[in-house]
Amino acid sequence: MTDMDGRFLGLLLASRYAVALTGAGISVESGIPDFRSDDGVWAKFDPYEYGHIDSFRADPGKVWKLLLEMRTLVESASPNQAHYALGELERRGVLKAIITQNVDGLHQKGGASNVIEFHGSFRTMHCESCRKSYASSEVSLAKLPPRCRCGGPIRPDVVLFGEGIPDDAYSRAFEAASRCDLMIVAGTSASVAPASDLPMVAKRAGASIVEINPNASDLSPELCDLRIIETAGEAFTHIMKVFSSIHTEVKN
Ligand code: APR
């Protein structure tokens, strides 16, 4: 365990209301590429052409090429040590919420239940024309784009560029950020608003901010009380080994 991990452990043990903000980096060790790294999704697909609502409206079949690739990866991926650690911290009552920008459902598969999906998920879909909702399992992807009975193109309930954050996720996330005394920011470049505003909201409310990222992000270094320059899998593996034994002792 490094010195940084030790300081993280101290903050975790002292916290009363810890919240995590996660991004694509937390799922990289599960085999899902992030967006902005050299081998990330946006190196292969232009974000405007494949990730914007206007592009979907103009050519849904084209945008579905990216959506299908993402969905296929997400379906076969399993949680890694970081997802399991956050699930365990929630179970122990230390972590109160996970705000994730990811649409892969891996936090839930890793045992967490209070997951705020800020950018939606692949579990459900809707028709872009008549807004009818669908469970993803009932939508055939044999022909793209899938079509609603009304003829409109069906799309997953993920937030595309140019769209707002779902109301419920937005209010729950900002409420959690303004309540927490510790925010763990893991695996995000913190470059996309409004998710990138959440650490500032937490900081202003008095929380400590711990960033876990092997690379530099857009999160201002002055905002961070601690920066752990490791992958999320490494950092959480290190701290959970010690945390589990100390937390049991504290509880006894
Ligand atoms: N552990 C922790 N962090 C990692 C790891 C890892 N194993 N691997 C990469 N990272 C870091 C990268 O250094 C980078 O800072 O994760 C971050 C990923 O950043 P992005 O690719 O920008 O992903 P994210 O922050 O989730 O993007 C936000 O942008 O395109 C949209 O809607 C998409 O939700 C996404 C949003």
Image (spheres, grey):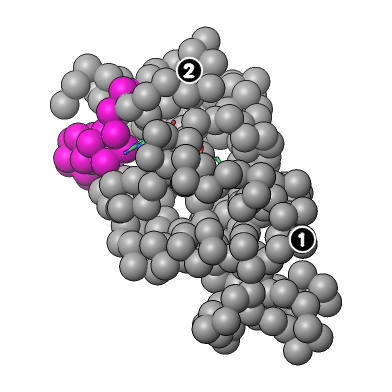
Q: Which mark is residue 121?
A: none
Identify the image quadrant of the C terminus: top left
Q: In this orientation, does residue 64 appear?
A: yes
Does the magenta stretch mainly form a helix, a strand or a loop? helix
Task: Report the side of 150 relative to 27 (left or right).
Answer: right
Q: Is disc 2 placed on a helix, strand or loop?
A: loop
Answer few, some or many: residues within 10 Å of disc 2's Cα (few below 14, many 20 plus, some between 14 and 19): some
Residue at left offset 77%, top offset 53%: 54
Q: Earlier in the sequence, mark 2 or mark 1?
A: 1
Look at 82% across and 73% down and name the residue there: 129
Examine the rendering and report whether any part of residue 8 can be seen: no
User: Vertically, is 215 above or below 97?
Assistant: above
Query: Which residue is at the front of the view, 49 or 71?
Result: 49
- Please give the name of the residue rendered at 55% of the width and 30% of the height, measured from the top-left corner: 190
Q: Is residue 243 on the magenta stretch? A: yes
Q: Is residue 112 above or below residue 180?
A: below
Image depth: mark 2 or mark 1 in front: 1
Give the image quarter of residue 156. Answer: bottom right
Say which element carries label 1: helix
- The numbered dot on residue 58 is 1
x and y percent of residue 222 in the render? 52, 10
Residue that mark 2 sits on = 224
